[in-house]
Image: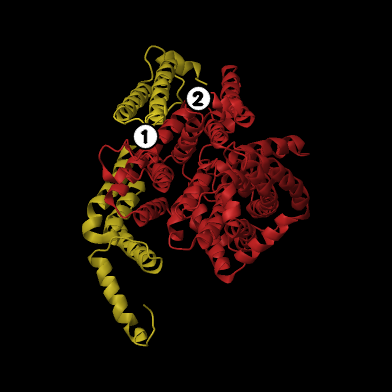
Amino acid sequence: METFALLLQGLAVAAQPINLLYALVGVTLGTAVGVLPGIGPATTVALLLPVTYKLDPAGSLIMFAGIYYGGMYGGSTTSILLNTPGESASIVTALEGNKMAKAGRGGPALATAAIGSFVAGLIATIALAFLAPWVVKFALAFGPREYFALMVLAFVTVSAAFGDSALRGLTSLFIGLTLGIIGIDLQTGQARMSFGIPDLLDGVEVTTLAVAMFAIGETLFVAAQGKRAPETVEPVRGSLWMSATDWARSWKPWLRGTAIGFPIGAMPAGGAEIGTFFSYAVEKKLSRHPEEFGNGAIEGVAGPEAANNASAAGTLVPLLTLGLPTSATAAIMLAGFQQYGLQPGPLLFTSNPQLVWGLIASLLIANLMLIVLNLPLIGLWVKLLTIPKPWLYAGILLFATLGTIGANPSVFELGMLLVFGLLGYGLRLFHFPIAPVVVGLILGPMAEQQLRRALAISQGDVMVLFTSPISATLLIAAALALIVPAILRARGKGQVLAEVAADGD
Amino acid sequence: MIEPMAQANKQRRPDRAALVIAAGLLALALLVAWDASRLGAGGAYARIGPQTIPYLIAVCLAGLSAWTVVAAYRHSFPEREPQEFAPVLWIVGGLVAQMALIKFTGFSIATGVLFAMTARGMGRVSLPLALLSGILISAFVWFVFARLLQLTLPAGPLEHLMLEGADIITAPFRSAPGGAA
């Protein structure tokens, strides 16, 4: 098996002592930041990107992989011990997990989340390793029009297919697309939407936008809620260990959650959250104790938490093989690649196999480190949760501005951080989703380049988009993803879609 | 999605905040279109140039603006919870202060001010204590990121003082040939 050989080579790269150290620093920082209330994986990777600026590409991406997985683990700890509905990827975990913690079963809840995440991460990362070369072979046949059609599909699924309103999703997307045209046009060298300001010629940095939207926007929003909804941290009482019944009730949900989460993440459909909701619904239906759901059913933590991690690994399939980010976190990771001039896609697998396979292997290592680190260090993470709000958010803003200045030491960049932070606050206030803005910013210019290339080849004939079967199919899928939810909403079935809203990450 | 009560109360007047959003989207559409109108075409035979996509985006933004107007009259925007603006002003003030100060005072002091004002906005804290701890934490962070991770962070008097201090402390260790750079 060729994949096995490549994966082993990757493990050899990832197992170098310095890379192990990077992975360890990554998972520790990722968990520590991810555990902070109100900070999801997307914010975690955006805040911690500057830490990796001065490393070599391989080391930086390995640390990044650790931060990503660590952030996901941290998020689930928060939602179990502190009922924070703000964190979309683990809303479902909070449903049952927080109830378990309130009933004094916080230890088993954390354990099943951690072990479930490990199992899911392990299976999904291996699935990623085997699926990726296959998708790459397929993707090599893609021309500009197929890429454009794929990106249109991603736009629709990220913004309009899920969530409670297509209007607000699309508005967010087009705000992102508008921000994406700022800067110099790559083909003609003309400045667009720059108004003679030199700082705008390079365009808007994805990391600046993400940090502003997630960290600053969230901080302003939390501040504006005043003293409403006092949050209490549930102490972890009793044993951390799961009983035999807990194990018996957990292992099937872990596997089912993985089976649900990975394909959803791997499709260009966006968002780790959707899988968690499906998994929750499935577990509720299959459970022999349906009455426990809503009062702390362990299956309701085990399944969604596994689905969450599996689909996070799944989003790496379109990201690595096609260069297509389908979540805000993936968009920031793409920005991380681009800072080294690396463009994820089929060519990266042939031009830089060590890097790609080193990254995939380090996901496995990060996953292993997390299970070893997370449970013994739970006391430390709980302490982080109890940092009083003023100090917590003051610290978040310190790091948010640090990252921005570190990437581009200019007062103008800080100004953009403030403006986009206020925009993020406004969007939250009116329930506009944030992820489409970030995805639109990074994917918009890429889609434009592909479209212009496709139309240059066809000498301006738009029909060329529909004469390729692949691109026609993708565009029809995009149209369906726009129309079907609209019909569902019009028939009053929008509730289901609102529940699977892809919001934060 | 709207409770009958709310609908009955507000039926006559459109959702004003939504109308403001619609106006903002329309203004953005016009701005994008105006900017695109200044661009030259991409080449002799290219029918699609740098202005094409901006025009497309402008048209879509205008369409979304119209859709938002419809939503405003139908009250299909979710209810907003009342917001407190004093904490928001503290934090925005902190960010503005950091921007204004950073060139002159360096990273630590400017960020310390941001830290203190954010903490003050988020709850009852003593400002002098917050300022002091903010500056100390920022100075520590500056040292780690600017010296150890070599990020370019603006230095001011406090940072220079720290560097001199560090120089004095590490001087005995650096005398050996080929020592730390």
From the viewer's perspective, tell me whether residue A185 is left or right of residue A71.
left
Measuring from the top left, give residue A229's x and y in whole percent. 46, 40
Quarter residue B170 falls in: bottom left
Which chain is rendered yellow in the image?
B
The chain ID associated with circle 2 is A
- Expressed as whole percent of the image width and height from the top left, the position of residue A446 reads 47, 39
State the image quarter where residue B143 is shown: bottom left
CA distance for labels 1 and 2? 51 Å
Q: What residue is rendered at 74% in x and 48% in y?
A: A250
Residue that badge 1 annotates:
B83
User: Mark 1 is on which residue type?
Assistant: Gln
Can residue A142 be seen at all in this image of the molecule? yes
Element assignment for label 2? loop
Residue at the disc numbered 2: A461
Q: Tell me where residue B38 appears, x and y as whole percent.
A: 29, 29
* Front-most of residues A223 and A480: A480
Output the chain of dot 1.
Answer: B
| Count of marks, rendered view | 2
The answer to whether tags 1 and 2 share a subunit is no
In-image side of B28 versus B1 (left or right) = left
Task: Tell me the kind of residue under disc 2.
Answer: Asp
Q: What residue occupies the far front of the structure in this picture?
A: B44
* Horizontal side of residue A289 vs A308, given as left or right: right
The letter of the red chain is: A
Q: Is residue A77 above or below residue B142?
A: above
| Residue A53: image tag | none
Q: Is residue B52 left or right of residue A311?
A: left
The reply to whether residue A387 is visible in this rendering is no
Quick one: SS at disc 1?
Answer: loop
* Residue A287 against residue A359 in the figure, above or below: above
Q: Nearer the viewer, residue A294 or B147?
A: B147
